[in-house]
Image (cartoon, grey):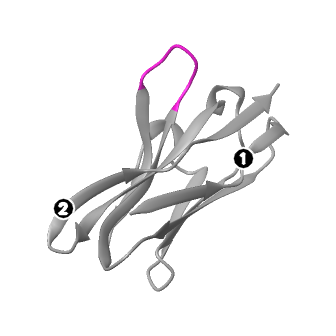
Amino acid sequence: VQLQASGGGLVQAGWSLRLSCAASGFMFTIHRMGWYRQAPGKQRDLVAIVRNGGTPNYADSVKGRFTISRDYAGNTVSLQMNLLKPEDTAVYYCYGEGDTENRPFTSWGQGTLVTVSS
């Protein structure tokens, strides 16, 4: 299962961006999708994630500013990022987990860079 992320770019503090990620492959079911991010010199951290039919989980640092949404029919996940801050600057990775041909999988997108200038 492949994940293809899009969106990202360079914005000023206070602006908004929307990231999208689409899953593709053969005979798969996704149970959970989300976003992680990795700032330079730091580890990859969870931003937001949601299980099918579940309540989204957000990192404390993005609560109230970021919103994750799923399109189950299209196997996509989006991340609406509002009131961006310079500390949100990072490479954002789409994440998905589920089953394909009765075998569990986890998959990562290629990463998309978000840069927030002050």
N-terminal of the pair, mark 1 or mark 2, is 1
For badge 1, the amino acid type reads Gly
The magenta stretch spans residue 41:
yes
Callout 1 secondary element: loop
- Magenta-colored span: 38-43
Q: Is residue 63 left or right of residue 45?
A: right
Which mark is in front, 1 or 2?
2
Please provide percent x and percent y for residue 64. 56, 51
Image quarter where the N terminus lies is: bottom left
Which residue is the site of mark 2?
Answer: 104
**Picture quadrant where residue 92 is located:** top right
Residue at 82 percent across and 38 percent down: it is 10
Q: Residue furthest bottom?
A: 73
Query: Can residue 54 be seen here?
Result: no
The disc placed on residue 8 is: 1
Residue at 45 percent across and 60 percent down: it is 2
Front position in the image: 26 or 22:
26
